[in-house]
């Protein structure tokens, strides 16, 4: 329960930061993806299946806070989580240097995929709704995108430590509760 | 297909994607509105505080970054101020003359809008120029379709979704935005639509009409939902549509949407 509450808080505040704090601070169209960073972190640490509910919650929050059709961000996030778990299992080696490098590459590739999937779905929805002027793949790899990539990678490296610490606190708390329950059941 | 490919991971992945695709394509209208309402009611105070805070931080950073340019800018502003003082004097004279002429011709005074000032509390983080969140909603009588302007009558968009204490503004540059417009200099009519959050395109202008670079584009008020004469932007480039039936013009918006912190709704 404690874990669920903490994760809901993290997702809620990350969404607010993503929509209300980052846009005024960063250049237009180069806003880092805080929610994507969360999904990447959880998938790398827990794997696809264990982090699936968190991924869905993150996608749903983005869908709710955004103006589009509900489901688009969930699909994007789930696809990315699936892809990351595939990469992490094969390429996240023990060596610290390579681990950091591979993690950074994973963030970069995930961001490209995330934007591409979201754009594709928006285009498809627009096309199905007869909207001729629906968004296309316009700024996937332009100057702003490179900045967005850099900012997201930096955000990932900055957030990795605190998120890991929160995770440790949660598992320590869970362990304590488990021990207490064992003591009570023995009595 | 061999069953070894159907791992629980793949099954879960496909199940989630299938359910979400159903949501996306069936697009059940309004099913998530109550969830959005609850979310915005909870997030409203945080969004407002965080947005104002980050704007202040941004202004401070910009201030320190622009100290070197301040002297130059000051001289430029002083010159501009002198020019504007002269222009105000001229316009005051014209205003008097205008009122006198209106009186003589029995023309009713120009309509003054009932405005509701709102703070911007959020923006689309992915596609800048798509939407804004503002801090007024149903509780202040805001309705879908109301035009949103900045202080000097410059149109920025219209209300697309209304919640209890917040609303979403779809900006002119959003790909779904469409406004009837008019070239102020040549009176050519057309529609202005968003260009994927990047700019504006004036389309459906007849080949016989004149469009010139630098012309001012305003709302024509033809559809009735938007008042006439709201400033949209200036023409940057004129071209012919791909089907060669109409003229098109790239219009540069008058405001930078990412820099907005206060907007006004015309009620």
Image (cartoon, helix red, strand yellow):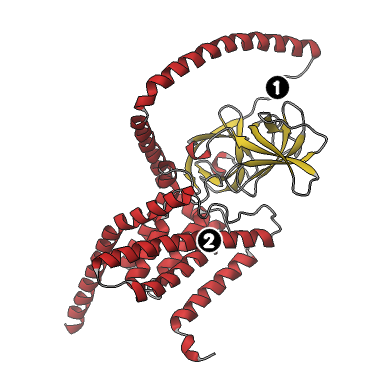
User: Where A100 falls versus B200 (above or below)?
Assistant: below
SS at badge 1: loop
Q: Quadrant of the N terminus of chain B?
A: bottom right
Percent x, y of residue B193:
67, 44
Q: Name the residue under label 1.
A: B110
Q: Can residue A88 be seen from the camera position used here? A: yes
Q: Which corner quadrant of the image does residue A122 belong to?
A: bottom right
Q: Give the left or right position of residue B251, taking residue A25 as reference.
A: right
Front in this rendered view, residue B10 or B201: B201
Percent x, y of residue B205:
77, 39
Q: Residue at x 81, y 45 (%)?
A: B245
Q: Residue furthest bottom?
A: B2
Q: Which residue is drawn at 47% across and 59% down?
A: A61
Q: Mark 2 lies on which chain?
A: A
Q: Which corner quadrant of the image does residue B140 belong to?
A: top right
Q: Give the left or right position of residue B184, taking residue B195 as reference.
A: right
Callout 1 crowding tier (Cα within 10 Å): few <14, some 14–19, many ≥20:
few
SS at badge 2: helix
Q: Name the residue under label 2.
A: A116
Percent x, y of residue A79:
48, 69
């Amino acid at each position: 329960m404690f874990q669920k509450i903490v994760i809901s808080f993290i997702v809620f505040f990350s969404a607010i930061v993503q929509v209300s704090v980052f846009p005024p601070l960063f250049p237009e169209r180069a806003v880092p993806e805080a929610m994507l960073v969360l999904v990447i972190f959880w998938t790398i640490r827990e794997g696809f299946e264990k982090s699936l509910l968190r991924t869905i919650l993150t996608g749903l929050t983005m869908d709710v806070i955004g103006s589009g059709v509900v489901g688009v961000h969930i699909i994007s996030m789930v696809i990315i989580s699936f892809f990351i778990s595939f990469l992490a299992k094969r390429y996240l080696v023990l060596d610290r240097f390579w681990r950091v490098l591979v993690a950074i590459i994973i963030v970069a590739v995930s961001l490209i995929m995330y934007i591409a999937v979201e754009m594709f779905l928006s285009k498809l929805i627009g096309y199905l709704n007869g909207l001729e002027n629906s968004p296309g793949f316009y700024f996937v790899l332009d100057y702003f995108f490179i900045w967005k990539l850099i900012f997201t990678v930096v955000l990932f490296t900055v957030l990795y430590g605190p998120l890991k610490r929160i995770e440790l606190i949660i598992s320590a708390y869970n362990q304590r509760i488990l021990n207490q329950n064992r003591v009570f059941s023995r009595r | 297909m061999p069953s070894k490919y159907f791992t629980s991971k793949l099954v879960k992945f496909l199940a989630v994607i299938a359910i979400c695709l159903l949501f996306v394509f069936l697009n059940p209208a309004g099913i998530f509105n109550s969830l959005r309402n609850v979310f915005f009611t909870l997030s409203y105070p945080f969004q407002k505080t965080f947005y104002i805070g980050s704007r202040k931080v941004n202004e401070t950073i910009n201030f320190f970054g622009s100290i070197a340019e301040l002297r130059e800018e000051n001289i430029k502003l002083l010159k501009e101020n002198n020019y504007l003082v002269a222009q105000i004097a001229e316009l005051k004279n014209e205003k008097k003359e205008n009122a006198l002429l209106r009186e003589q011709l029995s023309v009713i005074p120009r309509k003054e809008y009932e405005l509701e000032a709102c703070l911007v509390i959020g923006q689309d983080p992915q596609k800048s120029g798509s939407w804004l969140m503002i801090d007024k909603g149903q509780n202040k009588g805001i309705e879908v379709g109301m035009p949103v302007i900045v202080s000097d009558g410059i149109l920025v968009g219209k209300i697309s979704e209304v919640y209890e204490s917040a609303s979403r503004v779809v900006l002119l540059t959003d790909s779904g935005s469409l406004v009837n417009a008019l070239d102020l200099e040549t009176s050519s009519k057309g529609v202005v639509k968003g260009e994927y959050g990047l700019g504006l395109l004036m389309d459906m202008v007849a080949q016989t009409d004149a469009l010139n670079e630098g012309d001012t584009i305003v709302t024509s008020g033809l559809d009735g939902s938007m008042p006439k004469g709201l400033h949209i932007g200036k023409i940057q480039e004129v071209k012919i549509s791909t089907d060669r039936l109409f003229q098109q013009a790239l219009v540069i918006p008058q405001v930078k949407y990412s820099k907005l912190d206060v907007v006004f709704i015309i009620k």
